[in-house]
Amino acid sequence: MKVPLSSPDIIEKDIGAVVGVMKTRHLSIGPKVVEFEKRIGNYVETRYTIAVNSGTSALHLIIRGMGIGEGDVVITTPFSFIASSNCILFERGRPLFVDIEEETLNLDADKVEERLKNMSVEELAKVKALLVVDAFGQPADWDRFKEVAEKYNLKLIEDSAEALGSEYKGKRAGSLGEVGVFAFYPNKQISTGEGGVLVTDNEELDRLARSIRNQGRGESGEWLDHERLGYNFRMDELSAALGCSQMERIEEILDKRAKVAGMYGEKLAEVEEVQVPFIAPYVSRMSWFVYVIRLEKGIDRDRVIRFLREGGIECKPYFTPIHLQPFYRKMFGCKEGDFPITEDVTGRTIALPFFNNLKEEQIDYVVEKLKEGIGRISR
Ligand SMILES: *Cc1c(COP(=O)(O)O)cnc(C)c1O
């Protein structure tokens, strides 16, 4: 049996929506992007939504739009997809990593506060923002981060790229900081092929982000008037049409994913060497992005992955810590031992196959193979 790691859920209606746009010959800067922005804004309950060509572009727009630049410091997590930190580098800012919580895998607010408390006045003056990631879809402890941000007068950015539909104490991910981000690469909860959005209630940030997305054009909309340095980060109409069509099914999609996660949880409960994801009590709804298990200390994770792959099961060691990526080591002198919890966890995690239409027999096969692999390797 072959089981892929992920697989986007595309139905005939999605295909029809994209074909429909092609028939209009109106492929960019049109009504579908506007509609997609409305749908996301209504869902997340934020005032402004700006659709762009990737989640990474959305993060970049935030950093630029907030005026974070040369020498400015942004506190963030080393346990994430690399874009959540690279966006700071794009504008010559400096990420300052702080370790994560062992259970939730999210940035540890206590450690962030401790780090800020021990800074000199000069160091503190450089820190401009907290960029907090909702890792694997699970919202971080946002009340705590709000407290810390207020106390130290920092901007609060939510990388909710993996968390569309998740809720923290009844409030949707994306609306938990001053600004949030979603991404629509094919392994995300919904996909537009490539694409992303920025969501915020901040009018000034909306105005700047719209301009920078569109070659720095001003509100007049004149094609050759450029008020500032901008990019082409626009989302096209085909992608937006796919996004609209997928958003119509968002509840069904999230339910399907929750069901798959639930089946894994039940079937893995008896496997002693495997720790399933921990969901914190403040998470009132979990939107599952991936299904990442942790092996007991001492089991050779990479050998287990190899064994699963030989059995046709695609799986990955999510994530490799950002601070240990070669260019981070070189630029910032990061090294092993800097963030012990992140490093311990990343040595033991495996992302198992996870997508909307994963069948129970496929899950059974994955669990069987996992047990078999662990049994052979730990013996
Ligand atoms: C997917 C993802 C992004 C980037 O999104 P792209 O659309 O691939 O550019 C950013 N941050 C996190 C945490 C992600 O998982």
Image (spheres, helix red, strand yellow):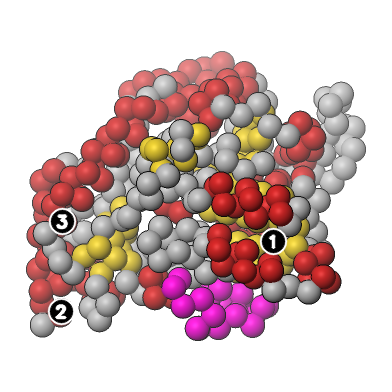
Q: Dot 1 corresponds to which residue?
A: 74
Mark 1 nearby-residue class (10 Å; few <14, some 14–19, many ≥20): many
Along the horizontal axis of the image, is 7 left or right of 326?
left
Picture quadrant of residue 282: top left
| Residue at horizontal 66 percent and vertical 35 percent from the top | 200
Vertical side of 7 occupied by 368: above or below? below
The label number, if any, that marks residue 269 in the structure image? 3
Distance from label 2 to label 3 (Cα)? 20 Å
Mark 2 nearby-residue class (10 Å; few <14, some 14–19, many ≥20): some
Along the horizontal axis of the image, is 243 left or right of 153?
left
The spot of residue 345 in percent (x, y) is 38, 70
**Residue 345 located within the stretch drawn in magenta:** no
Amino acid type indicated by mark 1: Val
Amino acid type indicated by mark 3: Ala
The spot of residue 253 in percent (x, y) is 33, 32
| Residue at horizontal 43 percent and vertical 61 percent from the top | 105
Range covered by the magenta-colored residues: 322-342
Q: Dot 2 corresponds to which residue?
A: 377
